[in-house]
Image: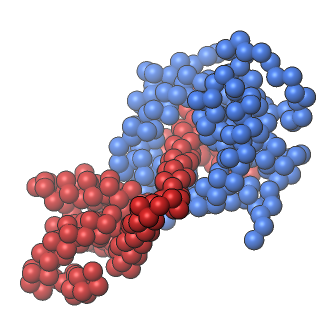
Amino acid sequence: MDENEKLDELIDSYLDASMSEEERVAFEARMANDPELRKEVDVQRSIIKAVRKERLEQIISNEEEKIKNKGKIRKLFIPVGSLALAASLLGLFYVGYMNSCENLASRYYAAYAYTPPPSRGGDDLALTKSDSLFFDALLQYENNNTKVAITRLKSLLDSDSEMLVATDLDIKWYLSLAYLKKGEKRKATALLQEIVNMPNNEYQGKAKDLLKEM
Amino acid sequence: MKLTDTDRIAYIRARDEYMIQKIYSLYRDEFLMFMRKRLWKEKDLVLDVYQDSFMVMCSKIYENKLNEANLTSSLKTYLFGVGEMKARNINRKKDNLPSKDIDNFPDIEDDVDEGLGEENEKIIQEAVKEMGEPCHTILVKQYWERKSTEEIAMEMHYISRNAAKTMKYKCMQKLKGELKGKIVYQN
């Protein structure tokens, strides 16, 4: 680790309040005599705040979406005429359908386990952009940003870019789960059928079982 | 299970996203009713004020400026106090008549960051939002989820803890480099 990397870690410790009292006093004395270091710390503090703020905004936005949807579903239950009753039953069915698709997808989902090959002479294995996109897609899936996950996985299937961590088969499996989670059963079925038809692959058994349950 | 303010502060501090959403919902409706009277000429801003106030409260908890020990009133009172301050600022700008209600809220310090200033904070906020991957994910895992470098290495499939550390450092340096020409320092 070079000196700059050590400084980055030191700034993190300071901002995290994980330094000892002695270390903190010494670091603050150093900052008082070094305006450039002071600026570096201020910027890093603001970056950390920005990361937290962005995540909080997302949490709040998700909750507002739930509140809005609750309001929409509540309207379906106003007992005014048989049309309203039919509409509420439809709403119930939709909620039940979505819940069952989500439950099914979550039962078959397992986090992707990538085992890198042994390193050569201590060099780090450089992941490609497509590899990063794949992992990001799974992260979006796990965070219930299913639409984004689908977009990312589809783009990976459509591109010819080099990937180290996953194959087309892996992508198809996770894409089928993402479609199912979103309630797009037809698209999920089509992909799962492709997987079943490919000879002797690790997802074949699971794909068959999932198709039976669907 | 009935939660106390101590519990709520602990959940917020722990970044428990499920509980943060619950706490957000808990105060929402009452706050909006309260704020509609304060911002009777700016009703469109009421939800924005709630969201900003909630984020200020959470930020104070993360910076340890608000904690179980120094919370002199209730968390709800603190939150409403932040909202009251924001409403006053909005009304002052619009030259609305000041509220005649007795101010029962505790002193809430200004939420504007004293370090770099509001404009610079906005620039940094935008830069963080626009970060590509894997940098964005690494910073979220480190600074929001508070994962260790070992955990980040495992979850992001880096070959070692040091590889994850180096990647995080490179991401930070890249971001700081992008901000260099844009941030104006006030001496």
Up the image or down, A8 lies above or below B126; here it is below
Q: Give residue A145's quadrant in the image.
A: bottom left
Q: Viewer-proximal residue, A188 or B179?
A: A188
Q: Is residue B10 left or right of residue B104?
A: left
* Residue A91 position within the rendered picture, expressed as x and y whole percent measured from the top left: 42, 64
User: Residue at 71% across / 19% down in the picture?
Assistant: B91
Q: Which shade of the palette goes to chain B?
A: blue
* Residue B167 position within the rendered picture, expressed as x and y whole percent measured from the top left: 40, 50
Q: Is residue A191 visible?
A: yes
Q: Give residue A202's quadrant in the image.
A: bottom left
- Where the N terminus of chain B falls, by quadrant? bottom right
Up the image or down, A121 lies above or below B41; here it is below
Q: Viewer-proximal residue, B171 or A211?
A: A211
- Figure chain in red: A
* Farthest top residue in view: B95
* Residue A68 position within the rendered picture, expressed as x and y whole percent measured from the top left: 51, 50
Up the image or down, B135 lies above or below B177; here it is below
Q: Is residue B52 visible?
A: no
User: Residue at 79% across / 48% down in the picture?
Assistant: B75
Q: Is residue B56 left or right of residue A110?
A: right
User: Residue at 15% across / 71% down in the picture?
Assistant: A190
Q: Viewer-proximal residue, B51 or A164?
A: B51
Up the image or down, A113 lies above or below A206; here it is above
- Where the C terminus of chain B falls, by quadrant? top right
* Farthest front residue in view: A81
User: Residue at 59% across / 61% down in the picture?
Assistant: B18
* Residue A32 position within the rendered picture, expressed as x and y whole percent measured from the top left: 70, 28
Q: How many numbered discs, if any?
A: 0
Indicate the colouring scheme: by chain
Q: Give residue A30's quadrant in the image.
A: top right
